[in-house]
Amino acid sequence: MSTLTIGVYEKYGANYKTLTLTDGAYALTVTPEKGGMATSFTKDGEEYLWLRDRNFESTDRPRCGIPILFPSCSKPDNGVHIFDGVAYPMEVHGFADLLPWQVKTAADDAIELTLAPNGLTKFVYPFDFLLTMRYTLAGNTATLALTVENTGDKTLPFSVGFHPYFAASKLENVTFAIDAATCSEDAKGEQPAAPAQITLTKKPGSADSIRLLTGVKSPMAFTDAGNGHKVEVAFDEATFGKGVLWQQDAENFVCMEPWNGWANSVNEAGRHEELAPGASKTFTWSVSIS
């Protein structure tokens, strides 16, 4: 069984409360004030997540740890969602990863955080909701469960996803084991069938490398020949039917992400989640390291 410890992240002027679950050789740390996200997952003290301190302590969007994506994944067309004929501006990946979350409970068995609407969210997303993020740790497996509840009186449209940054020695050392129906670099248009061996290679002239996957089978996994890390992302295929692989040049990470919508899905009928007033839905996935 895991045990909880409470600490403080203090670096470059930042001062954040941290909550850490430890089970044997494994430890999972969550930082509620920084987007409610997991910021460390270690085995015998060796870090499997990637944390960019200067980004972590700033007010910029976190490009590290495991950001929570809500109410959309990526950035909608023209940077706006259209609700009842009105355009509402929306940043890439929504706003859940930019806001401080509240601690609901913190105990040896689980950490639970919540996020409710405020003036900022209502300006860009005119809906009432309650998000509850639950973290648990059992041996080498961390389970992350996001519950979305519609607390308003109208249908709640959204997509969700997670954006884990895993430490990597270098991209050339990473081998993926992923079974998917399609694989492309652009979510629009006809999607080509995925090759038997999915790779993430650098595109000449581009700072980013990306693969967008549909019909993804659980789990997605990769092995890094440079640092010996093995990472497995498991999920409910009916909940997370899409996956993203992403890497940025000159950085030592690779992202292997479960999503359930694309950039413009919230604007497209039948391509996003909808909850009736009073309804809720939980989106659960896990990360295993070895």
Image (cartoon, rainbow, N blue to C red):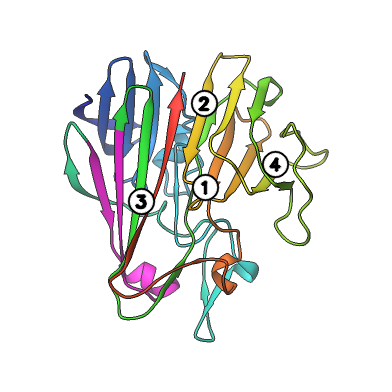
Dot 1 corresponds to which residue? 237
Q: Which mark is residue 208?
A: 4
Q: Earlier in the sequence, mark 1 or mark 4?
A: 4
Judged by depth in the image, the label closer to the viewer, 4 or 3, is 3
Q: CA distance from mark 1 to mark 2?
A: 18 Å
* Mark 1 Cα shell of 10 Å, populated few (<14), some (14-19), many (≥20): some
Question: What residue did someone put label 2 on?
Answer: 231
Q: Earlier in the sequence, mark 2 or mark 3?
A: 3
**Which residue is the extreme one toward the bottom?**
85
* Alpha carbons under labels 3 and 1: distance apart: 15 Å
Q: Is residue 155 above or below residue 173?
A: below
Q: Indicate the amino acid at tag 3.
A: Leu
The tag earlier along the polypeptide, 4 or 2, is 4
Secondary structure type for disc 3: strand
In front: label 3 or label 1: 1
Q: Earlier in the sequence, mark 1 or mark 2?
A: 2
In the displayed structure image, the side of residue 102 where residue 63 appears, left or right: right
Region rendered in magenta: 110-136
Where, quadrant-wise, is the N terminus in this rendering?
Answer: top left
Q: Residue type at mark 4?
A: Asp
Of badges 1 and 4, the one in the foreground is 1
**SS at circle 2:** strand
Cβ–Cβ under 8 Å for marks 4 and 3: no
Front residue of 70/141: it is 141
Q: Are marks 4 and 2 in contact (CB under 8 Å)?
A: no
Q: What kind of residue is marked 1?
A: Glu
Q: Is residue 42 above or below residue 191?
A: above
Q: Could you say which quadrant of the image residue 71 lies in?
A: bottom left
**Residue 164 coordinates in the image, percent (x, y):** 49, 38
The first of marks 4 and 3 along the sequence is 3
The residue to which callout 3 is attached is 146
Gap in angstroms between the C-alphas marked 2 and 3: 21 Å
